[in-house]
Image (tube, rainbow, N blue to C red):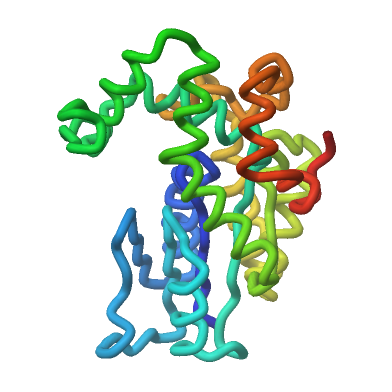
Amino acid sequence: MPVIIVASHHKAGSTYAKNCFFEVATILGYRFEFYGFGELPDLISSSFQKDTIICFSHARLDDLVALVSRVGLDSCKLVHIIRDPRTLIVSATKYHLDSDERWLSQPMKKYGGLSYQQFLRTLPSYPDQLIFEMTNGTRGTLADMSRIYMERIATITIRLEDISWDVSGWTHQHLSEHLVDDSLLLGSIKSVFLKHSLFSLQTPPRHSRTMVSPSFKDDLTGNVQQTYRNLFGELHLKMGYND
């Protein structure tokens, strides 16, 4: 069976991917490797056995291209999880205001000795916070996500919105069938994706701030909307989302 590579992004399915594909690896008898921000597999000495799932939470195009080249295009399946850029911005802003991730509290010279989170909290209004988020942390995330999407290197692209709320189970079935041909394993793998979807959870996950809600239009108005257009243009349309 081919190596499975999972490309996800901060506030765009990284926790979902990590939880799901760890369990999928167990079902398949695969080794599971997870790489966070700035972390990469050793492309020189690693053997990349076929029974491996490699999961990135901050995927970058250049790293994926190098990895696919090393593994072999015919020997891997690349799953890319995307999210509407507009809801990602809203979610990231709210998350960074109160998350306890270590990097958010580290003093930074560019913010006058304040941490990212401290500086974000000093801004006088929510629109100001959204604009700051767009022009700083999330700008890089959207650049990575859009580059991978536009290059069409993924063997399957899945929307976070769909795996979160598709109660029909079609998205989860589609993803499962893409990963395995074994009908005996198909049901077990699909059940993993369904189990971790938001509609299956009794309580919201701690990391979720917007529950992948499409109601972003009240947040992205006026100067916020103009900043989005200036920075990203019609990125959401290019990635298949509607206005």
Q: Is residue 234 above or below residue 1?
A: above
Asked whether the viewer can see residue 1, the reply is no
Q: Position of residue 61 (x, y in %)?
A: 52, 69
Q: Position of residue 216 (x, y in %)?
A: 68, 22
Left or right of 20 in this view: 116: left
Q: Quadrant of the N terminus?
A: bottom right
Q: Position of residue 221 (x, y in %)?
A: 70, 19
Residue at the image position 19 percent from the left and 36 percent from the top: 108
Residue at the image position 71 percent from the left and 44 percent from the top: 233
Please identify the residue farthest to the right as the structure is shown: 242
Residue at the image position 34 percent from the left and 15 percent from the top: 121
Q: Is residue 1 above or below residue 232?
A: below
Residue at the image position 56 percent from the left and 26 percent from the top: 90
Left or right of 54 in this view: 223: right
Q: Is residue 102 above or below residue 144?
A: above
Q: Is residue 65 above or below residue 10?
A: below
Camera-side residue: 157 or 124?
A: 124
The image quarter containing residue 197 is: top right
Camera-side residue: 102 or 170?
A: 102
Asked whether the viewer can see residue 179, the reply is yes
Q: How many marks?
A: 0
Please identify the residue farthest to the top as the structure is shown: 124
Q: Quadrant of the C terminus?
A: top right
Q: Position of residue 111 (x, y in %)?
A: 25, 31
The image quarter containing residue 148 is: bottom right
